[in-house]
Amino acid sequence: MKLVYENSRGQAQYKTSSKTLYTQYVGLAHADIIIDLLEKVLPFSEEHSINHMIANLANMQGTFTGAMEFFEKRFYPTMIKNGLRTYAMVVPPDVFTKFAADSLQKTVGGKLDWRMFPSFEEAQEWTDSQVK
């Protein structure tokens, strides 16, 4: 896997063979840190085909609602335009994160195949089944 970008709370990696982007967040959710990471992914998606994405939030605490406008108006529209077809989100048992994920899925989910999973293994298995 190729490291796309890493900051103090997150990491983005790319697997060329499956055209899958993996993001992972650890610790307290901070909108500016999440946006910082994903802002680096956008130009990468212009140069590399990203058809699938797995966002692992299992080790994140709190909610990402402060980044919702960025997700809805910039990140997902750009990623979908650049070829993103599937999105798997690993959600922690935290009720606030699940609520934010549900809200985001309702906004963006109709534009790509979006699923939520309780474990990374399940998200990976589903994503692997979507790789063509």
Image (tube, rainbow, N blue to C red):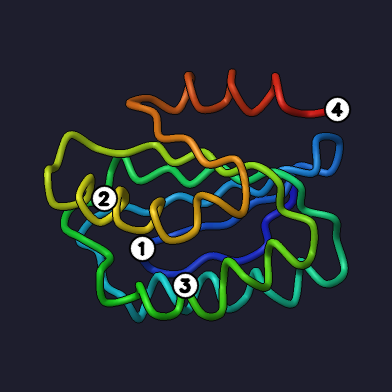
Residue 17 relative to residue 36: left or right: right
**Tag 3: amino acid:** Glu
Residue 128 relative to residue 35: left or right: right
Q: Earlier in the sequence, mark 3 or mark 1?
A: 1
Q: Which quadrant, please, contains the C terminus?
A: top right
Q: Are marks 2 and 1 in contact (CB under 8 Å)?
A: yes
**Tag 1: amino acid:** Arg
The CA distance from mark 3 to mark 1 is 21 Å
The CA distance from mark 4 to mark 3 is 27 Å
Which label sits on residue 132? Answer: 4
Where residue 89 sits in the image (x, y, percent)?
Answer: 44, 41
Single out the mark in the foreground, 1 or 4. 4
Name the residue carrying label 3: 72
Q: Earlier in the sequence, mark 3 or mark 2?
A: 2
Q: Are marks 2 and 4 in contact (CB under 8 Å)?
A: no
Which label sits on residue 33? Answer: none
Which label sits on residue 9? Answer: 1
Where residue 122 sits in the image (x, y, percent)?
Answer: 47, 19
Single out the mark in the foreground, 2 or 1. 2
Label 1 sits on a secondary structure element that is: loop
Residue at 24 percent across and 37 percent down: it is 92
Crowding around mark 3 (Cα neighbors within 10 Å: few <14, some 14 to 19, many 20+) is some
Label 3 sits on a secondary structure element that is: helix
Task: Say if 90 sits above or below 37 in the image.
Answer: above
**Tag 4: amino acid:** Lys
